[in-house]
Amino acid sequence: MERLPPLNALKAFEVAARTGNFTLAARELGVSSAAVSQQVRNLEDYFGKKLFLRTGNRIALTDAGHAVYPQTARALGDIAAITARILSDEVRMRLVVSAPSSLAENWLAPRLSALLDSYPRIAIDIRVEEDPIDVMRQGVDVRISYGDYHYPELVKVRLLHDEVLPVCSPELSRGLGNDASLIDVHESAFIHTNWGPNYASHPTWSEWFAAQGSARRPDPSRGRRVGLSSLAISSARLGLGIALGQHALARADLEAGRLVALSSTTVRLGHPYCAFVPPAKTSRADVKRLIDLLKADGFSQPADMM
C-alpha cells in the first residue's frame, strides 16, 4: 500500500501556502493559528524537510515547499471537484466560467452563445471578477485572465495576444476628415483607459503615437477617462471620443460599421489572455469545446495544450 502523508496536515499546508499567512489559513479552516502551525510541522516531520521559512508572523515557501505545493493544490482540488460532483443534486450539466469585466460582454458572451449550439441544454454560470480568485474553492471550471502567471497550479491555455488601435463612431470619423495621424485632434477627444493599479503593462495613447513615429503625447487629464476596455469601446461607439480599442473586443462593431478604425497602426498588449482549468476538468467535453471557441481567434499552438 502506498504511503500517504496526513491529509489534515496537507490541507493546512496548502491553505497556508496559498494565503501566505498562518492566521489567514486558520480563519479559512476554522481553527487556531497554532493548530495550523502544528499541522505544518507534522507534515515537515513526515517529509523530513522544512516547507516554510518563518520570520516573526511572516512565512515563505522553501525550495521544498515550492516543490510540494503545486501538486498538493492539484490533488486537493481534484478531491474537492469529485466530492462536489458526487454530492451534487443537479442532473443538468453546469459550466462555471469566470472572466474579468473587460472581456465578459463583448468577447466572452458571443462565444458562450456558440457553445450552446453544441450543448443546447447546458446551464452556464458566468462570473465577472478580477484576478486573483480561488478557482478550486469557488468551483470554477474555466478562468479567463489577462496574463499567464496567476494560477501556476492549473492547466494553462493561451488564447490570444490582443492589440489596440484607434476607433471611433462613423459620425465622428467623418468630422475628422482623412488625417489618420490624429496629430491635430484636440486632446479632449481622446478616450484613455485606466487599467487600475494592478496593471503596469497596458498600452497608452503615448505609445500609439510613438509607434506612428510621432512625438505627440496626449495628456490623460485633458481627455476622457474610463475604467474598462469594454467601456472605452462603448464610449467610442456612442460618439464620445476616440478610443484605443482592443481589436478582439471591437471586431464585431468594426465589421458591422458601428465603429471605424482610424489607422492600421496597432500596439500590442503587455500580456496574453489565457484560460486556466483545474486538471480534473480538462477532459470534460464542454470545457474542451469552450476552449476551442475561445482560442479560435488567437494562438494556433497554445503554450499548454489540453
Image: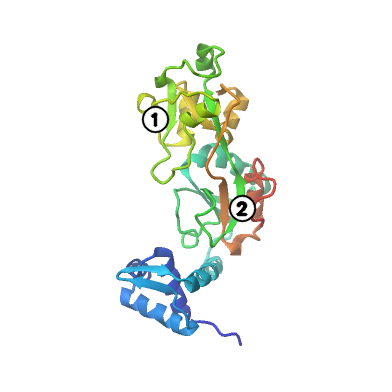
Colour approach in the figure: rainbow
State whether residue 258 appears in this view. Answer: no
Can you identify the residue that label 2 sits on? 157
User: Three-letter amino acid code at disc 1?
Assistant: Arg
- Nearer the observer, 81 or 120: 81
Give the residue type that dot 2 points to: Val
**Quarter where residue 177 is shown:** top right
Task: Report x, y in % for residue 195.
Answer: 43, 39
> Which residue shows up at 40% across the image and 32% down it?
226
Say which of 68 and 298 sits in front: 68
- Indicate the secondary structure of the residue bearing disc 2: strand
Q: Identify the secondary structure beneath mark 1.
A: strand
Q: Position of residue 295 (x, y in %)?
A: 64, 45
Residue at screen point 51% across, 28% down: 210
**Farthest residue in the right direction?**
300
Location of residue 27 in the rendering, given as x and y in whole percent from the top left corner: 33, 68
302 shown above or below 13:
above
- State the image quarter where residue 294 is shown: top right
CA–CA distance in space, label 1 to label 2: 32 Å
Q: Point out the image quarter for the N terminus.
A: bottom right
Q: Which residue is pictured at 41% across the width and 77% down the height?
A: 40
Rendered position, 281 above or below 267: below
Q: Earlier in the sequence, mark 1 or mark 2?
A: 2
Q: Which mark is residue 43?
A: none
Q: Position of residue 130 (x, y in %)?
A: 44, 48
Residue occupied by mark 1? 225
From what the image shows, is residue 240 above or below residue 286?
above
Q: In which quadrant will I find the C terminus?
A: bottom right
Q: Are marks 1 and 2 in contact (CB under 8 Å)?
A: no
